[in-house]
Amino acid sequence: MNYQWILFDADNTLLDFTRSERDALRLALAQVGIVLEETHHQLYHRINKACWESFEHGQLSKEDLRTRRFQLFFKEIGLEADENHFSESYLGYLGQTEHLIEGAMHTLEVLKENYRLGLVTNGLKEVQRPRLARAGIDGFFQAVVVSDEIGYAKPDSAFFEFTFGQIGHPPKEAVLMVGDNLNADIRGAEEFGIHSCWFNPLQQGNELEIKPRYEIGNLVELLDFL
């Protein structure tokens, strides 16, 4: 296909969010006297994922998202702490992480020679923009769209409409969306009318009716067909 634009999701597509999440949780828990155990991270990861899915479906506000996940987490581990203060601490640490997915830097360096690149993320602005800069990849993108800054989140078509305004309204067939999230990235893109590439390194099953145009297990595989 003759794509002009490649739009990338951020977390667990280019940035290793799982690793960053663990680091930030470890440091935030240390401030309240708790040593992170792997069971803590597994529990929080499940809760956080569920809260973000609720947010993406319009069932949870951005403001509630920031603290609800910690309310649920504290209840499960029996911790009494101020979830607002903990959230601020956690987000501060999260914004200081810089872990990249394997192959991300090489893939971006190759693609920038022939394509225009965009970064589209459902993350929080005080977390995503510092992480992009610390990871050294912010300069690759002609457009960066953060849901927290525009009031819409993937898979909402309004998010993609805003993104298309930022990239000059190219033909939809000239745009490819690459992401790991079947609902936010793949369903959002396909329903908007652009092709999608599912980054699926863990070889998860696809339970949605909507199928991606492509599926890859490693970012470098993008270079094989672009």
Image: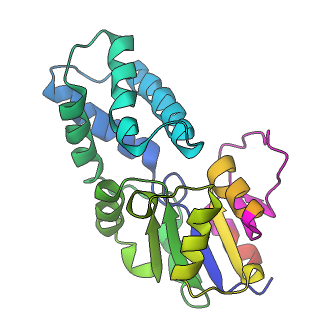
Of residues 73 and 65, which is closer to you in this image?
Answer: 65
Q: Could you tell me which residue is drawn at 64 percent across and 64 percent down? A: 178
Q: Could you tell me which residue is drawn at 45 percent across and 51 percent down? A: 16
- Occupied quadrant, residue 169: bottom right
Q: Is residue 155 above or below residue 38?
A: below
- Occupied quadrant, residue 39: top left
- Asked whether 115 falls inside the magenta stretch, the response is no
Of residues 107 and 24, which is closer to you in this image?
Answer: 24
Q: Pinpoint residue 191: horizontal percent, then vertical percent.
A: 76, 60
Q: Which residues are magenta?
A: 192-221
Q: Could you tell me which residue is drawn at 23 percent across and 45 percent down? A: 93
Quadrant into which the C terminus falls: bottom right
Q: Pinpoint residue 176: horizontal percent, then vertical percent.
A: 69, 73
Quadrant into which the N terminus falls: bottom right
Say if residue 123 shows up in the picture: yes
Of residues 52 and 4, which is closer to you in this image?
Answer: 52
